[in-house]
Image (cartoon, rainbow, N blue to C red):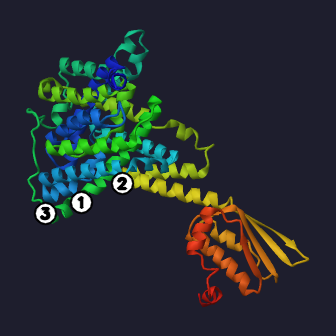
Amino acid sequence: MLTNIKSEWFSNTRGDLLSGTVVALALIPEAIAFSIIAGVDPKVGLYASFCIAIIIAFAGGRPGMISAATGAMALLMVTLVKEHGLEYLLAATLLTGVIQIIAGYLKLGSLMRFVSRSVVTGFVNALAILIFMAQMPELIGMGWQVYAMTAAGLGIIYLFPLLPRVGKMLPSPLVCIIVLTIIAVLLNLDIRTVGDMGELPDTLPIFLWPDVPLTWETLMIILPYSLPLAIVGLLETMMTATIVDDLTDTTSDRNRECRGQGIANIGSGLLGGMAGCAMIGQSVINVKSGGRTRLSTFTAGVVLLIMVLVLDNILVQIPMAALVAVMIMVSIGTFSWDSIRNLRTYPLSTNVVMVVTVIVVVATHNLAYGVFAGVLLAALFFANKIGHFMRVQSELDEASNTRTYQVVGQVFFSSAEKFTDAFDFREGLNRVVIDLHRAHFWDITAVSALDKVVIRFRREGAEVEVIGLNEASATIVDRFGEHNKPGAVDQLMGH
């Protein structure tokens, strides 16, 4: 146990403390911005961010991943806050946590295996685009000083690591924020700062039970919001876990992560915060800044709390241009540039799934819509591709006027029509043998196709024998098949 604790918490102490500090700085403006999107006080987003980060450090299943208030979740809260107020948002946050905990115990995190790599790539690219687009309001029309500061910030981020010795000691995003803040203060530049984003909280969060009636009516108000919040939160979290797994060459416990996100959201709701989930941008910042263990996530939450409560006079002077530079770095690092280079070599279906996922996410700003569209398209392409691997061969024994059909491959809704079309019902045979030793029947559509073939041959006066069904196929055919039941021919004629 002690070995496990050391591995998950203290195997990379310096890197985790530094990266957690960088993440905490990046969390402040985003938490405030997401609060504004949701229509609540900036304190709600900040309370949520450090509360979720601290809890998920202990309860989550993915060391080094950052969870806090997010834009994807905030977009789903707008109508609830507008129509019912903050108290109902807190209640919805609690219910969101409960749903996510249930999802974890039902092992729904394992459903990520149904999400193809092309969908994940599209998701990542869409998030990179959204992160970049979110920085545009801080750049467009802000004057040359902001442009110069942002360019200088990007220069520091990409060039500082090239310096001998010192370049490896400090994460360049942290150096960028410190240097640009000093420049802005010394030159007294008239540019937007963190302080312009909203008022920072000056007290610790307190236990706050939502002031809503515990009635069926309340449940019906918050459930239509809690359910999509839980789904989007888990989707973004699972996607982020997949990306961090790839970046760190490690594995994560998806179902524990589902439960951890639920526990964190319940904690956030009870302390006056909004629902949140894993953040791909901050998680990438954390990893690229050297964060690897739970200590980095815990540090991000604690440092955020300390900075907001103690160092607020310094924080409000951080120029937004510095944080914009960091987030542009994140968007560039997040985008899968290989996916562009591979467009010529990858199959068309893979490219279509990736591009559609990107388009839907960017157009709707809803990660769930994009993922659902991508998964649906990937499933359709897969079904179509597998359907082509089914073939039917036949041999005629002229002496007995018997034709043997050999079916090879998977028979299901996509290949059922091809299966039916492979038989010649007008040949005038005495006997037909359908050999299914090398075939598998998957669904009701496949069974219906077999019924149609057998009954049509019998209607033409041929004796039909079906052989070679494996155990699974025989089970579904025996249960749902009609061709061996009385009156089967009459039923076909009636249809």
Percent x, y of residue 167: 39, 14
- Left or right: where 75 falls relative to 477: left
Question: Hey, what amino acid is under mark 1?
Answer: Leu
**Which residue is depicted at the point 58% across and 40% down?**
342
Asked which secondary structure carries label 2, the reply is helix
Residue denoted by label 1: 223
Q: How many marks?
A: 3
Of badges 2 and 3, the one in the foreground is: 3
Quadrant in which the C terminus is drawn:
bottom right
**Which residue is depicted at the point 27% across and 37% down?**
138
Question: Hey, what amino acid is under mark 3?
Answer: Thr
Asked which secondary structure carries label 3, the reply is loop
Q: Residues within 10 Å of mark 3 (few under 14, many from 20)?
A: few
Q: Are marks 1 and 3 in contact (CB under 8 Å)?
A: no
Percent x, y of residue 4: 36, 25
Q: Which mark is residue 215?
A: 3
Percent x, y of residue 359: 44, 51
Q: CA distance from mark 1 to mark 3?
A: 12 Å
- Left or right: where 393 falls relative to 276: right
Percent x, y of residue 258: 33, 45
Residue denoted by label 2: 364
Q: CA distance from mark 2 to mark 1?
A: 22 Å
Of badges 2 and 1, the one in the foreground is: 1
Q: Which quadrant of the structure image shows residue 485?
A: bottom right
Rendered view: 332 above or below 349: above
Question: Hey, what amino acid is under mark 2?
Answer: Thr
**Is residue 144 at least partly visible in the picture?**
no
Q: Earlier in the sequence, mark 2 or mark 1?
A: 1
